[in-house]
């Protein structure tokens, strides 16, 4: 049975977007392909209001999170963490033989500029930060953290925007970031399979001096091809058709409207969750794309099963708070009306469970 996804990714994909994937195949070393990639890059720049280089990889987002470390750090980095995905980027650093200064913030709390700066070691080459921590539902105040770091020293700044980009205004036009990573299966509301990175000239310059960048995720190799609107290796062309089509739809909706719709959906979910349960993330730093709910005595599997019978699906908790929380994704192309339908179904299932 079809279940509408109110998950943290992959998320609900509209039929017309799926259908855009059925266009006839083309080869990835020809003019038709070049037009397609160029069109995608232009639309991403327009939507995010940036003029950074946009590189596209045939992978999930983690591939490009690793690329930041492999291409931007020779020896030492800092990783800010207040959840499972912050920890993952720290781990990626360690597994790639970098020294990682771990900057730990309690789960559920936001990273703050003054705290980060107080502990940050000035000899780090890069700092990683997760914009929207999908395990806790915290949206970190990027401008506060980045401005504070820049006032103290000058590392590269890498942002995991996997569940934030295209759902929350990251104000990239005024953030002095060196890498911003996201993928297709979250707020872009597409199937999984493509990762995207916006890179600064500073990062590309730094990469020239970093050894062992590998091949598949070498940002310099990707940039060399991207300058000709070409991929390094064979990309999922069908998904790129859908990405181009979806970006057109997104621009037609308008980014301001899109961000406002996400905020309205988040407010509806938060006010429901605060009445029925409690919210895991601290007030004032709650994400507009994912709400993490402390579930008390609720048996999540029973809730999910009941919702499934009504044609809905949400997400369980993640990381070390997996057993004490569950998550609702309200991103992509979902509407406030659909959120209200979900919340009504949740009420009915919860009522039947008592
Ligand atoms: C914040 C964040 N970072 C990274 C990832 C990993 O993304 P992917 O599975 O596309 O590699 C996720 C996935 O949920 C995420 O939510």
Image (cartoon, rainbow, N blue to C red):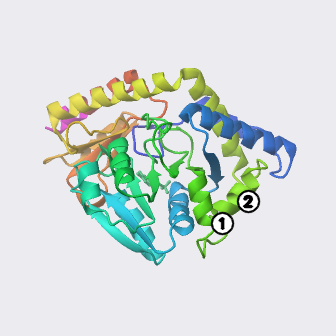
Q: Which residue is mark 2?
A: 232
Q: Which residue is mark 1?
A: 216
Q: Earlier in the sequence, mark 1 or mark 2?
A: 1
Q: Position of residue 40 (x, y in %)?
A: 68, 39
Q: Is residue 183 visible?
A: yes
Determine which quarter of the picture holds residue 306.
top left
SS under mark 2: loop
Q: How far apart are labels 1 and 2 at the CA level? A: 8 Å
Q: Position of residue 258 (x, y in %)?
A: 47, 26
Few, some or many residues within 10 Å of mark 2 (<14, 14–19, 20+): some
Task: Say left or right for 40 vs 102.
Answer: right
Q: Give the main secondary structure, helix, strand or loop, of the magenta stretch.
A: helix
What is the magenta range? 349-354
Going 64% across and 51% down the picture, which residue do you hit? Answer: 56
Q: Position of residue 38 (x, y in %)?
A: 74, 40
Q: Position of residue 312 (x, y in %)?
A: 38, 36
* Residue 351 in magenta stretch: yes
247 versus 325 height, above or below: above
285 versus 27 height, above or below: above
| Disc 2 CB within 8 Å of nearest ligand 1 atom | no
Tag 1 and tag 2, C-beta contact below 8 Å: yes
Few, some or many residues within 10 Å of mark 1 (<14, 14–19, 20+): some
Residue extending farthest right:
30
- Locate the C terminus and report the quarter of the image it occupies: top left
Task: Say left or right for 202 vs 27.
Answer: left
Task: Say left or right for 62 vs 32.
Answer: left
Taking depth in this image into account, of 335 and 139 the one nearest to the observer is 139
Number of marks in the image? Answer: 2
């Amino acid at each position: 049975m079809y279940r509408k996804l109110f998950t943290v990714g992959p998320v609900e994909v509209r039929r017309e977007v799926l259908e855009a994937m059925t266009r006839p195949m083309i080869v990835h070393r020809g003019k038709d392909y070049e037009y397609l990639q160029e069109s995608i890059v232009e639309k991403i720049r327009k939507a995010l209001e940036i003029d950074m280089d946009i590189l596209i990889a045939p992978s999930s987002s983690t591939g490009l999170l690793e690329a930041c470390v492999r291409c931007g750090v020779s020896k030492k980095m800092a990783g800010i963490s207040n959840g499972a995905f912050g920890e993952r980027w720290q781990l990626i650093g360690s597994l790639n033989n970098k020294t990682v200064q771990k900057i730990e913030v309690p789960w559920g709390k936001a990273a703050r500029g003054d705290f980060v700066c107080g502990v940050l070691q000035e000899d780090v080459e890069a700092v990683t930060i997760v914009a929207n921590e999908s395990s806790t539902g915290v949206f970190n105040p990027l401008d506060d953290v980045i401005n504070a770091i820049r006032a103290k020293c000058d590392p590269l700044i890498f942002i995991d925007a996997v569940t934030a980009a295209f759902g929350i205004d990251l104000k990239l036009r005024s953030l002095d970031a060196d890498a911003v990573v996201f993928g297709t299966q979250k707020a872009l509301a597409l199937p999984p399979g493509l990762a995207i990175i916006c890179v600064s000239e500073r990062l590309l310059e730094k990469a020239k001096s970093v050894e062992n960048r590998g091949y598949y995720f070498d940002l310099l190799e990707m940039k060399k091809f991207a300058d000709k609107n070409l991929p390094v290796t064979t990309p999922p062309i069908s998904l790129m058709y859908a990405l181009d089509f979806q970006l057109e739809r997104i621009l037609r909706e308008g980014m301001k409207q899109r961000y406002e719709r996400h905020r309205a959906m988040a407010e509806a979910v938060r006010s429901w969750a605060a009445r029925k349960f409690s919210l895991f993330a601290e007030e004032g730093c709650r994400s507009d794309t994912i709400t993490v709910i402390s579930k008390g005595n609720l048996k999540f599997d029973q809730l999910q099963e009941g919702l499934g019978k009504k044609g809905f699906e949400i997400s369980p908790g993640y990381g070390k708070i997996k057993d004490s929380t569950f998550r609702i994704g309200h991103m992509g192309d979902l509407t406030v009306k659909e959120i209200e339908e979900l919340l009504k179904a949740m009420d009915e299932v919860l009522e039947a469970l008592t």
